[in-house]
């Protein structure tokens, strides 16, 4: 079960929703076979904190007699709920049945409907986004940690550790100097750094961009709503400017202008066709 501590602002909404609830919020139903659960309001808070409240509707009500209670007659015992929720810009839909566990204990169908709807809501939350899924999986729950690892791997392509690294001094073939860096950037690939003796960055590294400047660039790229385009922009940024964590101060204005030009998803390109039928 996930115990990883990370900056939630770097996680997708889907990842945040799938994280286990704090043990202090988990309750246990009475009896020898009592199951762990969280209350409806706790699930609602998770949604409102991460995505906003989902849209729900009751699709169907089921009425039935209750075993051992023939005098009760046919009462409401279950509802089918439909839940719609936008997660990371994508609409998700789920339908789940919820039941009133002890319909004989409720005064009327209105109370039974509330219990059944609450149960259906939590089941929809589990189905649509993995909210509370760890309560079913017990010690076998690994989804939360896996999703965090996936998100952190994506971010590590853009921002690496703040620890100071060493740089390699070019030696040997002079063609592997500045020309190599410029050519690699033009080709959209990371420049190949020739291997050689190392030296401390403290005396040779140019002034770095400030933390605020780096954070601003990162937040602007992170705010790109289309996930595929966001990943593409991050990869191209690293290819053109290197790791954001080591961005030189002299490159801030150019990098900022580059991000501005790439924030929007480009419209589909109209393909022109010449008389021969070949696109050009």
Image: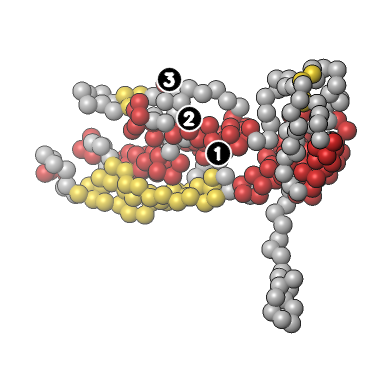
Residue occupied by mark 1:
13
Mark on residue 24?
A: 3
Q: Are marks 1 and 2 in contact (CB under 8 Å)?
A: no
Mark nearest the camera among 3 and 1 is 1
Q: Residue at x 68, y 42 (%)?
A: 235
CA–CA distance in space, label 3 to label 2 = 20 Å
Q: Earlier in the sequence, mark 3 or mark 2?
A: 3
Q: Earlier in the sequence, mark 1 or mark 2?
A: 1
CA–CA distance in space, label 3 to label 1 = 23 Å
Q: Are marks 3 and 1 in contact (CB under 8 Å)?
A: no
Q: Residue at x 72, y 57 (%)?
A: 266
Point out the image quarter for the C terminus: bottom right
Residue occupied by mark 2:
145
Q: Earlier in the sequence, mark 3 or mark 1?
A: 1
Q: Position of residue 133 (x, y in %)?
A: 39, 35
CA–CA distance in space, label 1 to label 2 = 14 Å
Q: Position of residue 279 (x, y in %)?
A: 71, 72
Q: Residue at x 69, y 63 (%)?
A: 268
Disc 3, SS: helix
Point out the image quarter for the N terminus: top left
């Amino acid at each position: 079960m996930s115990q990883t501590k990370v900056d939630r602002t770097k996680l997708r909404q889907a990842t945040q929703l799938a994280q286990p609830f704090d043990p202090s919020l988990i309750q246990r139903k009475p009896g020898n076979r009592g199951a762990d659960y969280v209350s409806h309001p706790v699930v609602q808070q998770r949604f409102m904190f991460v995505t906003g409240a989902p849209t729900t509707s009751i699709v169907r009500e089921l009425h039935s007699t209750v075993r051992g209670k023939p005098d009760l007659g046919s009462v409401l015992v279950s509802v089918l709920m439909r839940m719609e929720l936008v997660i990371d810009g994508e609409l998700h839909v789920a339908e789940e049945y919820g039941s009133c566990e002890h319909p004989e204990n409720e005064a009327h169908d209105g109370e039974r409907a509330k219990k059944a709807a609450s149960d259906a809501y939590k089941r929809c939350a589990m189905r649509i986004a993995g909210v509370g899924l760890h309560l079913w999986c017990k010690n076998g729950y690994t989804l939360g940690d896996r999703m965090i690892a996936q998100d952190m791997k994506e971010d590590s392509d853009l921002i690496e550790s703040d620890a100071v690294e060493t740089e390699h001094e070019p030696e040997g073939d002079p063609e592997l100097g500045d020309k190599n860096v410029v050519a690699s950037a033009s080709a959209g690939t990371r420049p190949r750094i020739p291997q050689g003796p190392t030296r401390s960055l403290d005396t040779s590294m140019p002034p770095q961009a400030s933390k605020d400047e780096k954070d601003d660039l990162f937040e602007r790229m992170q705010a790109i709503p289309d996930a595929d385009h966001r990943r593409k922009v991050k990869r191209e940024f690293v290819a053109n400017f290197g790791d954001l964590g080591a961005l030189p101060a002299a490159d801030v204005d150019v990098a900022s202008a580059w991000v501005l030009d790439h924030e929007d998803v480009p419209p589909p390109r109209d393909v022109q066709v010449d008389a021969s039928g070949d696109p050009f």
